[in-house]
Amino acid sequence: MGVAAFVLVWASSHPQFFAIVLFAFTVVNIVGWWLIVKRINPVIDTSRAKLKGDLFRLDQLQSIETHMVGGWQKVRFAGMIFLSLVGIVVFYLIWVREFFAKIVETGTGISFDANLLPPIIYLCYVLFAEIWIWTKRESLRATLSTTDRLRKHYSLQSKP
């Protein structure tokens, strides 16, 4: 991760490379997630077998599994890939930048500098990726915490 951060910082002062490095960073992020999922799935299965009678813990395990390997991750990654590809197109194809600037100017009546579009796309990328994952992390934390509190005060039985 340190290497990726270094490359992104380096690329931030070389705009001609930043869009491509951001895309590569996203691909590396996806591959890393895929490798984690491959290693964590057997651990989840083993844990599920060991927790068979503990319904609260099983629910927590299900929440963790959904967080780690759920479909939301794939949708998030697809959005990140899309935004990084848009960043490449907008940076390298000036006519696309100018086209979108004209749309903004026509729609709002406000003058818009086409050169602001790449940084706006990068900001959208960061906001999209980070707000989504931090929202999911907080949701998981709240779920695990609530389940722990309930486990301390109540007992559950499976439906027959």
Image (cartoon, helix red, strand yellow):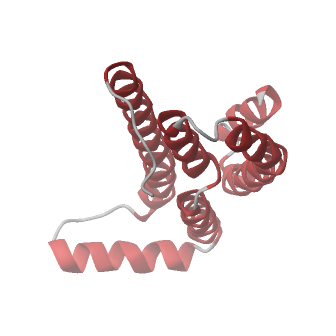
Q: Quadrant of the C terminus?
A: bottom left
Task: Work out whether residue 86 or residue 74 is closer to the camera in this orientation and state it.
Answer: 74
- Residue 22 is left or right of residue 79, and the answer is right
Asked whether, in this view, residue 22 is left or right of residue 150, the answer is right
Q: Quadrant of residue 109?
A: bottom left
- The image shows residue 103 at horizontal and vertical percentages of 31, 79
Q: Quadrant of the N terminus?
A: top right
Q: Nearer the viewer, residue 157 or 97?
A: 157
Q: Which quadrant of the view contains residue 7? A: top right
User: On screen, 31 above or below 58?
Assistant: below
136 over 71 or under it: above or below:
above
Q: For the view shown, which residue lies furthest in the front direction?
A: 160
- Answer above or below: position of 38 versus 77: above
Q: In this view, which residue lies farthest toward the left?
A: 109
Residue at horizontal 82 percent and vertical 30 percent from the top: 3
Whole-percent x and y of residue 6?
A: 76, 29
Side (left or right) of 11 relative to 153? right
Report x, y in % for residue 113. 36, 61
The residue drawn where x is 47% and y is 35% is: 56
Q: How many marks?
A: 0
Residue 31: x and y, percent? 80, 53
The residue sitting at 70% across, 43% down in the picture is: 14
